Image: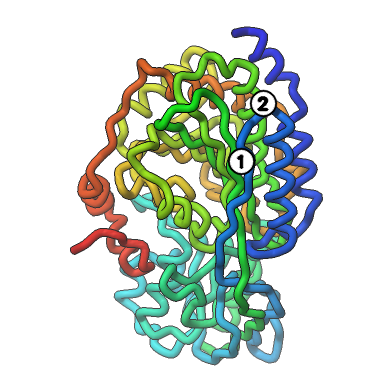
């Protein structure tokens, strides 16, 4: 056992792959860069000994960034369009709704106005409110345009998609602005008329998922996943080049002791995660959910040393993660709540056991993610290696014949979302899959 741990702790495989993928440049869903990233992932998985390595292509709504701007008081303020914003220009009174909590939208008349909200929630609030939820509260209230203000300092406007599965292009022009620009807008021009302009090229496109396998030819399988696409404004090192590097490093480590696996390991690097979990939703519609024993989804790993595991109420997953962390003396945090915002979710929402594995960032949320600053220099090779050891051992235990975790009924997941006050937001976004 100690030999594979030592090899993993000194391995350059995952890190070299991470350097390769960030150097591609733009990996926006549907782009040539995303295709190159998928092929690089395929080649890396094949080189470490995985078998049945392949690409699976599917259609998506393409969106390419043009220019964007906010005109206020005779000035032009720096902004970036949110992916899948429609092209267009909108005028209206600027209204700053602060955090953009659901109650803020109920209590404020926003019809015909330009609504600005922050990218975080206050410490006293008991759940995270996703950008798309805030966007669709604005749409429902009749807003003319949507401005998403970063809460992290550094003159970094945030990106992140809008749109729904049914209507991939959003309803109103939407842009991201830095914390500093947002503060300036609120201080100088709240209550005044401003103009939001977005230009974008909207077209048909394709993306692809990368697949590979290790272990015995069992019908049952463990999914070890990540997403290969990234927002076009940066290298996508943390979100989610590091997750795909983790998949490659885990594949290398698992190939070292493949004979210990009791269950087939199915590696998947999804395409088009950043524009609505399109790649994982496509796969979820093609695969027998009963064949999936568990999912280890790496999205946000390596941003810090302490790992966090959303366990979605599966007690067996929580216990397994804590046992491995205790044995290795590695800091982790387990979160029993539902986490409906990454590529595990198209499966977990129907009761498939799964983790969303990410890193603790304190109050910073995504931190540098979804900004120009998501670059390789923010990531530490030590964290990649240490976390690969932990997650590889965890995967071996999940694959063991001795480990059992029952699937849940979809109604149990729906009830948990209701209890956690997440259902209303998912319904307004169009992400609620359950019959009423």
Query: Looking at the image, which residue is at 45% across and 53% down?
Result: 341
Q: Position of residue 346 (x, y in %)?
A: 40, 51
Q: Nearer the viewer, residue 175 or 292?
A: 292
Q: Position of residue 322 (x, y in %)?
A: 42, 22
List the residue tagged with mark 1. 243
Using the image, determine if residue 47 lies above or below residue 373: above
Tell me if 296 is positioned left or right of 256 in this view. left
Categorize mark 2 by other alpha carbons within 10 Å: few (<14), some (14-19), many (20+).
Answer: many
Q: Residue furthest left?
A: 436
Q: Quadrant of the C terminus?
A: bottom left
- What SS does tag 2 mark? helix
- What SS does tag 1 mark? helix
Q: Position of residue 5 (x, y in %)?
A: 64, 14
Q: Nearer the viewer, residue 3 or 255?
A: 255
Q: Quadrant of the N terminus?
A: top right
List the residue tagged with mark 2. 252
- Going from the N terminus, do you reach mark 1 or mark 2 first? 1
Residue 411 visible in the picture: yes
Query: Comparing marks 1 and 2, which lies closer to the viewer?
Result: 2
Residue 179 visible in the picture: no
Which labelled disc corresponds to residue 186? none
Categorize mark 1 by other alpha carbons within 10 Å: few (<14), some (14-19), many (20+).
Answer: many
């Amino acid at each position: 056992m100690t030999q594979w741990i030592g090899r993993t702790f000194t391995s350059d495989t995952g890190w070299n792959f991470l350097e390769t993928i960030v150097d591609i440049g733009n990996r926006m869903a549907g782009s040539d860069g995303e295709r190159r990233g998928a092929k690089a992932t395929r080649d890396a998985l094949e080189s470490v000994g995985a078998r049945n390595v392949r690409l699976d292509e599917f259609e998506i709504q393409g969106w390419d960034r043009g220019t964007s701007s906010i005109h206020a008081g005779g000035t032009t303020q720096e902004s970036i369009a949110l992916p899948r914003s429609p092209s267009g220009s909108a005028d209206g009174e600027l209204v700053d709704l602060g955090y953009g909590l659901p109650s803020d939208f109920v209590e404020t008349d926003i019809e015909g106005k330009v609504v600005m909200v922050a990218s975080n929630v206050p410490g006293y609030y008991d759940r995270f409110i996703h950008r798309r939820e805030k966007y669709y509260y604005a749409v429902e209230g009749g807003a003319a345009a949507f401005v998403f203000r970063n809460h992290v300092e550094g003159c970094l406007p945030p990106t992140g998609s809008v749109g729904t599965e049914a209507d991939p292009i959003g309803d109103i022009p939407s842009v991201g602005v830095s914390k500093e620009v947002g503060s300036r807008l609120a201080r100088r021009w709240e209550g005044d008329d401003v103009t939001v302009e977005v230009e974008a090229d909207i077209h048909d496109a394709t993306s692809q998922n990368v697949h590979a396998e290790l272990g015995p030819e069992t019908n049952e399988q463990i999914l070890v996943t990540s997403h290969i696409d990234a927002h076009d404004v940066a290298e996508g090192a943390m979100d989610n080049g590091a997750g795909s590097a983790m998949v490659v490093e885990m594949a290398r480590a698992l190939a070292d002791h493949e004979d210990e696996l009791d269950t087939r390991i199915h590696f998947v690097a999804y395409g088009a995660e950043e524009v609505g979990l399109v790649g994982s939703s496509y796969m979820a519609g093609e695969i027998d959910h009963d064949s999936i024993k568990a999912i280890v989804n790496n999205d946000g790993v390596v941003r810090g040393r302490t790992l966090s595991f959303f366990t979605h109420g599966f007690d067996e997953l929580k216990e397994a993660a804590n046992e491995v962390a205790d044995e290795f003396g590695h800091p982790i945090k387990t979160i029993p709540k539902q986490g409906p915002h990454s590529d595990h979710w198209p499966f977990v929402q129907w009761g498939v056991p799964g983790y969303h594995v990410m890193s603790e960032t304190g109050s910073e949320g995504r931190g540098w993610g979804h900004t120009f600053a998501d670059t390789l220099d923010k990531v530490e090779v030590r964290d990649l290696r240490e976390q690969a050891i932990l997650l590889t051992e965890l995967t071996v235990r999940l694959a063991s014949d001795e480990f059992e975790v029952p699937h849940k009924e979809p109604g149990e997941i729906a009830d948990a979302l209701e209890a956690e006050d997440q259902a209303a937001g998912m319904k307004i976004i169009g992400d609620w899959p359950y019959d009423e």
